[in-house]
Each structure stands twice: as C-alpha cells, then as structure tokens.
Image: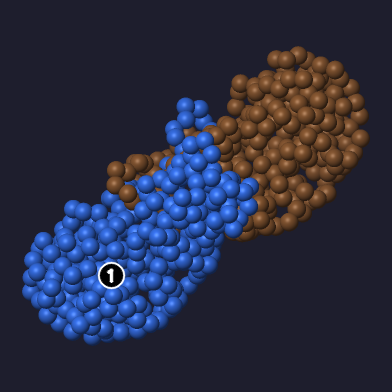
Chain colours: A blue, B brown
Amino acid sequence: MAATAQHQQPTPERFFNTVNAHQQTEAMKAAIELEIFTAIAEGNTTVPDIAKRCSASERGIRTLCDFLTVHGFLTKEGNQYSLAADSALFLNRHSPAYVGGAIEFLLTPRMREGYARLAEAVRRGGSALGDDVLEPDNSVWVNFAEAMVPLTRMASDTMAAEIRKGGEVHKVLDIAASHGMYGIAVAKHNPAAHIYALDWKNVLEVATRNAKEAGIADRHHLIPGSAFEVDYGSDYDLVLVTNFLHHFDPATCTTFMRRVYASLKPGGRAAIAEFVPNPDRVSPPVPAVFSMTMLVNTPAGDAYTLAELEEISKNAGFAKVELAPPQIGLGRLVIAYR
Amino acid sequence: MAATAQHQQPTPERFFNTVNAHQQTEAMKAAIELEIFTAIAEGNTTVPDIAKRCSASERGIRTLCDFLTVHGFLTKEGNQYSLAADSALFLNRHSPAYVGGAIEFLLTPRMREGYARLAEAVRRGGSALGDDVLEPDNSVWVNFAEAMVPLTRMASDTMAAEIRKGGEVHKVLDIAASHGMYGIAVAKHNPAAHIYALDWKNVLEVATRNAKEAGIADRHHLIPGSAFEVDYGSDYDLVLVTNFLHHFDPATCTTFMRRVYASLKPGGRAAIAEFVPNPDRVSPPVPAVFSMTMLVNTPAGDAYTLAELEEISKNAGFAKVELAPPQIGLGRLVIAYR
C-alpha cells in the first residue's frame, strides 16, 4: 500500500502522492460512472473509440485512461489500452464478479464528510458525525446490502466451505445478515440447514430477495430487530457474526457475544468474520487501516486483533477460539466454540 | 505509485485501495493540522505522549499513527513511533524544508470540487469549473505563491545552478514569477543579474517579500500584468517560464513563446520548468498523472512531452531545445535557445 518506491535521497514525493490520493478515488468513481472498463472489455481500445462509446471527449478519455494505466488498472501499448486482469474480472459491468457498485456504499456523502472531519474525530476519539449510523432502520444499511452482494459472492462461499469442514449444521442464526449472502452460502453447503436472518426489517427485504434468487427461500426465516434486543431463539448449531463487532467497543461486543453464546447448543460455533490486524496493528495493510474507517464512522468501534477477539469471546463464555486459515474476501474468519 | 503488490490471483484489493485513497488525503491533512510529525520530532513517541502534545484522544492518535505507519510516513517498534526520513525532513514544522503548507494550495475547495466533478470534465474535455482560475488577480495564485515557497527552495537552487553552467546572465525576465523563488535563485547564482518579475500585482507582493528576505531586493524589479498582454521589455539573456505552459493549449503556448522569443537577445535562453511525461504519457508517474490536474482545472491545459515542448518552441522561432539532466523538484528543465 506504500504509495511510491523507496528513494535513496529524501523526497517529498510520497507526501505529494498522499495529499493527491483523493485524485485516485475520483478517477475510479469517474471511470465506473463513464463505464471505461466496460467499454474496453467490449473491444474499444483507442481513445477515439472509447470516447465515442462513453459519450466523452477524446482529451478527457486520454487523460483518464493514462491515469488508470499509471495506477495499474489498464495497460497501454502504443495507442491501445487493455484491461489489467483484475479490472477485466471486477470492473467490467458484464462480468459476474463486477464490484463497481460498491462505490455507492464506500463513497456515500456521509462517509466523505466523516473523513473530511477526521482531525475532529482524532481529537474526540470517535466519529464527528454522531452515532446515527447505528440507529434502527437507517437506510445506509439497505444501500450497503445491495452494493456488497457481488463482492461477497466468493467470500461467503469460501467461508461456508470452511465452516462445513467442522461438521454439518442444521439451525443457523445469521446476525446482521444484511444482503444475507453469508447465511445463504451456509444453506447451500448444508442442504438441511435452516437460516434465521436477523437485521432491520428494511434490510431483510434485500436478504429475502437474495434467498429467493438462490433457491433456498423455504429454508430462510426472518428475525427483524436489534441484535442487542430481539429474542434470538435457541439451540443453534452455528451463529454467523459477520462484519458486526467492529462497530462497537469491547464491552459492548462482550455483552453481545453473551447473547450469541446463550443461543448456541453445547458444542455450537460462532463464526466471526472480521478485519483482523496483526498484534502490531500496522499489518496487513487492509485490516490495519480499517480502524480509521471505524474511528470516522462510529463512536467507539475498532478493527480487533485475534487476541482481542479471543478475550471478548472468552469473557462471553466461549471455551475456545481459532483463526481459520483462509482469507475471507478482504478479512478473516474466527471460530468461537461453546 | 501502484497501490498494492502484485497478486497471483485476481483480487479487488487494488480497486478498494483506490476507491478508499481519499482516506490517505484526509489522514495527511489531519496529521498536518494536528502536528503529529512535529510532535514526534519533539520526542513524543508513544500514543499517550503524542495525544497530550496534540490535544487529541489516545484512540484517535493510535488509529491515525498506525495509518501513517502503514503508508510509510512513520515507523513503529513496539509502542514507539518514529519519523521516516522523508517525514523528518519535510513534515516537521521546525524543519527548514517543511512542505506541510502546500496542503493549503493542493486541497483548496476549488481543487476538491474540480475532482469531484471529474466525470463531467472527461465528458466535456475541460474543467467543469469554467476558466476563472486564469483570470486576473485571482487570489488562488497568492495562496499558491505563499504555500509553495518551502517546496521550491531546493528546486529553484538546482535549476539556477544548471542554468549558470550555460553562462552568466545579466538581465532576466521571470514570467508568472509567483513566489519569485526561481528568479531569486538565479539572482543568487549570478551576482550582477537584475530580475524582472512578471505576475498579477497581488501576487508580486509575495515575490517582493521573498526578494527582500533573500537580500536581492535592489536587483528585483516588477512587471505587473498579464503575460499575454503586458510589455516585457527586451534584450534579456534569460527568460524563466516556470510551471506556466501547462495551463494552456499548444496554440496559446506558441503565441506566448513568440513573445518570449522576441524579448531575448540573440543567443539568449528560455528556461522552461514543467512536468514532462515520457512519449508514452504514462511514465514517470508524477508528470503522467499531472495531465489530469490540468483537465480538472483548466479549459485546455496539459502536461507536455519533450517533443511537444520542442514543437511549441520551434514554432515560436527558437533554434534548439534541450532537456537538462537534473530533476527540478518533481519536474524537469527544458532550455530553448534563441
């Protein structure tokens, strides 16, 4: 994630690249909006052809495509642009793995404003925006659920396969289910499993739609409400806690995990998907920097290390905590055993 | 400038890093505002000490310092943060090479708005903001002049030394002088030289202040007005054209360079400092991506290749054009001979 190669002599280049890094955000946003990657995937490889397909100027297209080449999303040979491998898979709108829609969630005005007020968040030790993002039925979570589906397709399958290695499950609670993709993947890997998806009522409409599309609607049930208040039911083999704990401080996480513990059968598992930085908190880069997104967006959330997740889980009653080997999307899977 | 290391398997990580790149901008802005680097330079190396010095929360400081470590501005050993070499030289407010003030120019609301409307600029082939930035007495150029002084200290000295190798100069025109630092450096390297600094009247106040500070006020003269309209005078040995041509299209640059040519003695030189991308337009990264800043900010400006600068100069009458060997700050020096 370092912005430049190492230099022998001191140079302010890294500083300038970092100050100007917002240009990369805007270039990607414009490229997705103008469908540059899709245009090239369709066979438009020169500035005039891309400009025509994207209803844009040649000067603008040349400048943007060169910028995207410098940043590794395109390659350029003579006057011909091609898609880098990652761009062909993830940024062409015709690809089933297209993730361009994630921009809608990652770059909401709220997120941008939170970052614009970062100095204030650092001073006070929590979001400068208040805690409305954690309030009931906030529509931001509907946007999230809809935008993140393509990205979670691979991750949820990897996670469900890993969980299946520990034994078949029959009754599964999917907390903060969002798009429902993690629970749906578990349903696919466990043909007898029934999934109980918990989230705000408006968000569960997205999960229900996805469960229908996946053909498991008859095994997909809803628990609308707050994960801190609603009755979970009991006797679960598995509780999914995906990308949820990072919104809260450790004490709140522990209180929550006690509810999870109480809902599990003896021997049942909680599957926690999280960004998990190393103990040094500065590696690997993606989970390490995720802490700042929580500083900016929540009153007291964080990216927790494995030791912290273990402490939270054990304080909540769990007997054993393990880090599963595979990468799950950009995060990791931690299994807590009752 | 690539955001991540190469991966064997396709991954959307580069896409996410790029969408989230605005976080780097905001982190640097907050770090400069909170004086994180200065605090560490003063010997505050732990989260509690830095938090106290910066009047900020420990949670916020830990998160921001870890982010800055991931991005190479700090190093972290156990609980101790240190400054990377570049940060110690350029980001500590007590350092004479401090460049943190450049943020004031690089991140003006106008610049941010221009980038926020990048897709529109790509469609129309020029700034979505109109051309007011090129209008007389725009105060943005006073901000620029004041913010850029520390950054140009080394660059202007390197440039003046390189020019001096081609012979002593006596009468020098410094067009779009801004902070005046390039002309002032030439005055220092040529003890008999008189500098005629041309810029908007409000901007020349900054140059005059810097000429006084440098002790060359008696050899520093002012020509207030537009570089396209005002009378330059004549018989110059040297005309400085620093970071000016990129604001205009090639035809306008040629018209302007004819005026420069006419003001020079036979055998005189124009010293053009510019971002100069290679013919491929995608390397080196800094000049290559500078094209986009001109797309966003000007009606028809660009980062010109050496071949384009040569064509502009020769069309204006110059006999010979050479690229000088040294890097001048983040740009290059091109000499055109009358």
Residue A142 picture location, percent across and down: 40, 75
Is B143 placed left or right of A4 in the picture?
A: right
Q: Which residue appears at 39% of the width and 71% of the height?
A: A146
Residue B150 picture location, percent across and down: 65, 37
A27 or B84, which is in the foreground?
A27
Q: Is residue A335 visible?
A: no
- Quarter-wise, where is residue A157 in the image? bottom left
Residue denoted by label 1: A181
Residue B219 picture location, percent across and down: 85, 26
B197 or B237, which is in the foreground?
B237
Residue B234 picture location, percent across and down: 90, 26
B245 or B43, which is in the foreground?
B245
Q: Which residue appears at 36% of the width and 41% of the height?
A: B5
Amino acid carrying mark 1 in the image: Met
Q: Which residue appears at 63% of the width and 33% of the height?
A: B305
Is B154 placed left or right of B43 in the picture?
A: right
Above or below residue B3? Residue B112 is below
- Quarter-wise, where is residue A251 in the image? bottom left
Above or below residue B239? Residue A52 is below
